[in-house]
């Protein structure tokens, strides 16, 4: 393999890359989000500068992605923290758990998504939307919401998603396990179509686990919940802060 060919590689392993180079589009991506209050001092201890904590609110998510081009079929769960960046609303992706290796490897290597392997599930249980996450044999999260009880303003939902960028702390070590890449990465959702958006009464429980510590941000009060079905493209990232320089 020639040096110029090697320089064009974008994914490991070189013999059979985990993902391609095209943008990643997901059809009928189904979000279940529960907003809840936690302890603001805990958030201040984990959100990286120069992001700013603006409240004690956390977003628990379970996301069903049956048709994610380039990655396949998987379900994801995690915690998102609303923040401010340069005086504008944003969100910091704190923890993510999913059941698809290409999406784990690609998400971490390209953007810096904090992905770990687990088995989340999103399903309808009679009249209830049920989102769960197991890490190994242990249940670490369970969320419920009344199924499609109250319709939301689709245009307002689209506007909120498009105008709120996500931020990631990308960490890749050198070959001696010292820090090599430590970056704050910004990304946007693109080509968004919101097909349905619902809200209703909700509940959320998080359970302690040493290696899936969502319960480290304990639920103090459930605020509201959303069930949103979309088509979207995950845009490329942008490095906005390099901690190694």
Image (spheres, rainbow, N blue to C red):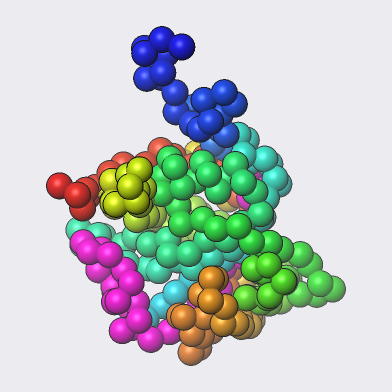
Q: Which residue is outermost to the left?
A: 245
Which one is in front, 147 or 237?
237
What's the residue at 40%, 69% (across, down)? 81
Q: Which residue is outermost to the bottom?
A: 220
What's the residue at 22%, 64% (across, down)? 49
What's the residue at 51%, 55% (across, down)? 115
147 sits to left or right of 101: right
Q: Which residue is outermost to the right?
A: 126
Which one is in front, 106 or 5?
5
Q: Position of residue 189 (x, y in %)?
A: 45, 46
Question: Where 213 falls versus 50 (above or below)?
Answer: below
Q: Which residue is outermost to the front?
A: 176
What's the residue at 44%, 74% (across, down)? 58
Q: Position of residue 76 (x, y in %)?
A: 61, 58
Q: Position of residue 149 (x, y in %)?
A: 70, 73
**Magenta stretch?**
27-55
Q: Position of residue 70 (x, y in %)?
A: 60, 34
Which one is in front, 135 or 217?
135
114 sits to left or right of 135: left
Residue 19 among those drawn in magenta: no
- Residue 188 visible here: no
């Amino acid at each position: 393999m020639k040096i110029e060919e090697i320089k064009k590689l974008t994914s490991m392993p070189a013999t059979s890359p985990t993902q391609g180079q095209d943008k990643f589009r997901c059809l009928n991506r189904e979000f279940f989000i529960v907003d809840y209050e936690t302890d603001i001092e805990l958030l201040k201890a984990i959100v990286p500068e120069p992001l700013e904590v603006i409240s004690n609110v956390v977003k628990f998510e379970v996301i069903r992605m049956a048709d994610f081009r380039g990655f396949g079929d998987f379900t994801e769960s995690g915690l998102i923290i609303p923040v401010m960046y340069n005086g504008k609303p944003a969100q910091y992706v704190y923890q993510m758990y999913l059941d698809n290796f290409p999406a784990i490897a690609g998400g971490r290597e390209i953007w810096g998504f904090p992905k770990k392997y687990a088995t989340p599930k999103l399903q309808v249980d009679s009249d209830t939307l049920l989102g769960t996450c197991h890490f190994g044999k242990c249940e670490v999260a369970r969320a419920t919401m009344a199924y499609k009880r109250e319709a939301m303003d689709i245009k307002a939902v689209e506007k909120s998603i498009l105008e709120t960028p996500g931020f990631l702390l990308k960490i890749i070590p050198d070959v001696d396990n010292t820090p090599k890449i430590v970056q704050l990465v910004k990304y946007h959702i693109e080509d968004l179509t919101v097909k349905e958006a619902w809200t209703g009464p909700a509940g959320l429980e998080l359970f302690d686990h040493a290696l899936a510590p969502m319960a480290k941000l304990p639920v103090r009060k459930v605020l509201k919940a959303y069930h949103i079905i979309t088509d979207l493209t995950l845009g490329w990232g942008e490095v906005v802060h390099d901690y190694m320089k």
